[in-house]
Image (cartoon, grey):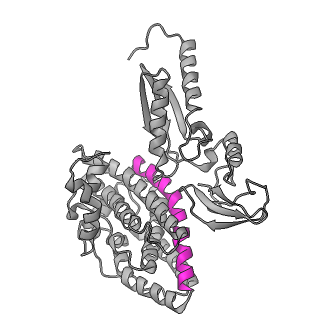
Amino acid sequence: MSLPAAESPAERDTRLAHAWNVLGLVMDPEIPVLSVLDLGVIHFVELTENGVRVGLTPTYSGCPATRVISQSVQQALGANGFAEVEVKEVLSPPWSSADITEAGRAKLEAFGIAPPSRPVRSLGELAGRPRRCPHCHGTDTECLSEYGSTPCKALYRCRTCREPFDYFKCL
Amino acid sequence: MSAARLAYVLRLADTNLILAQQLGALVGHAPSIEEDLGLANTALDVLGQARLLLSYAGELEGLGRDEDQLAFVRDPADYLNLALAEQPNGDFAHTIVRQFLIDAWQRELYEELQRSQDERLAAIAAKALKETRFHLRYSSGWVVRLGDGTPDSHGRMCAALDALWPFTAELFDADAVDQAMIDEAVAPDPALIAPRWRARVQAVLSEATLPMPEPARFGWYGKRGQHNEHFGHVLAELQFMQRAYPGARW
C-alpha cells in the first residue's frame, strides 16, 4: 500500500483532525446531547488510503444504540469527504462509564440525567448512586427502579423537589 | 482450530441465546413495570453476549455462517445450551431462581475466563462480567425478598429450587470438550468454579431462609445437544421467521 503521493504529513494531520471533528458531531441516539466523543466510545481513528478506520467500543453488549451509532459514524464520515469508512468493533478493554468525558458528564446533568458517581475506573459498589438531583441539586435521593429506559440507566426520585430522574449507572 | 473450541464457544453462546429468548417472552408479562424493565434489560445483555459469541463461533466453524444463521437455522440437537437455560419461565419464582443460578455461575466463570489464552473469549468475558454483576445483584435481591417473604412466596421459591436444582449438575460436570479447553488453558476447570458458585449461592439462599440443596447428581446434558420437552417450543418461536421466510432481512 502506498500513500497518495500528493499528500504531505501536514495534510494528513488535517484530514485526521477533520475526522475527529466530524465525530464530535455524531450524537448518541438515546442521549442526543452526547457525542460519541463525549461518550468515550471511539477507541482510535486511523487514516487509510481512501478514507478512515474508526475503532468503536460498545457500551453494553446488548445496547441497541451501538448499531445506530456505528451507522451514524459511517454516514457522517462518508458525507464529509471520506470515501471509504471502516468501523471496527473493539471489545478490549471493555467500555467503562469512566470513559465519559468531563464535558460529557456536565452535558448529561444539564440534560436531566445524573452522571455516573465514579469518574474513575474502579470496582466498588455496583452502579453507584447519583451525587445529586440534576434538577434541584438536592442530595436526598431514592432509587425507584434499578433499570430505567435504557440498559445504562436507573430511575431515581429526588426527595427534595420530588421529581423523578434518570441516573447513568457506573459500569 | 479445534472442534472442542467451537463446541465450547457454542455452549456459552447458546446458553445466553436461549436464556435471552426465555426472558424476552416475559416482556409485557412481568409482575410490575420495574421487573419488566429489569428482565428485558437482562435479556438484552445476554443476547448481546450471545451475538458476540455466535459471531466468534461462526468464524471458528469456517463455513461462512454468521450469528443469525447460527441463531436461527440450526436443528435442536445442534444447540449446546445448558439445560437449565431452557427450563420454562413458570411463575416469577422459577424465572428468578433460573436466573440466579445461571448468574452466579456466569459470575464465577467469566471472572476466570477473562484470563483465557483465547484472547477473543477473554475480551468477551471481561465485558460480560461487568454486566453479569448487575444481573446477579438483581436476581439475588429477588431471591432474598421472595424466600424471606410470605409463606406463599417462600413456598414457591422452594418449589422452583426443587424443580431447577437438578439441572445444575451439568454446570460442573466436565466432559471431553471441557477437558480439552482446560488443557489448552482456554477455559477454567469447572472443579475450580464449583465451590465458589456453591458458596455464593449458599450465602444468598441462607439470607433468603431457603434450604441449600445437596449437590445435584443427575446430569442432563443440554451442552451435548440433549434437550427436553420444552426446547421445541422455545425454538419454534425463536426460529419461526427465518424458517418461514428463509433469509428475510429488514
Q: Is residue B219 above or below residue A84?
A: below
User: Does residue A160 appear to the left or right of B15 in the view shown?
Assistant: right
Q: Position of residue B82 (x, y in %)?
A: 33, 68
**Image quadrant where one finds the C terminus of chain B:** top left
Q: Toward which corner of the image does residue B164 lie, by quadrant?
A: bottom left
Q: Residue at x 65, y 57 (%)?
A: A167
Q: Which of B115 and A160 lies nearest the eye of the viewer?
A: A160
Q: Residue at x 42, y 31 (%)?
A: A86
Q: Residue at x 70, y 48 (%)?
A: A109
Q: Is residue A160 above or below residue B205?
A: above
Q: Is residue B119 visible?
A: yes
Q: Residue at x 46, y 22 (%)?
A: A82
Q: Is residue B5 above or below residue A87?
A: below
Magenta stretch encompasses residue B127: yes
Q: Toward which corner of the image does residue A36 lie, by quadrant?
A: top right
Q: Is residue A161 above or below residue B51?
A: below
Q: Is residue B173 visible?
A: no
Q: Position of residue B175 (x, y in %)?
A: 28, 67
Give the farthest residue toward the bottom: B151
Q: How many marks?
A: 0
Q: Which of B236 and A44 lies nearest the eye of the viewer?
A: B236
- Residue stretch in magenta: B119-148
Q: Position of residue B19 (x, y in %)?
A: 38, 65
Magenta stretch encompasses residue B246: no
Give the farthest residue toward the top: A6
User: Does residue B166 appear to the left or right of A110 in the view shown?
Assistant: left
From the image, give the main secondary structure of the stretch colored magenta. Answer: helix
Q: Which of A22 and A117 lies nearest the eye of the viewer?
A: A22
Q: Position of residue B214 (x, y in %)?
A: 41, 86
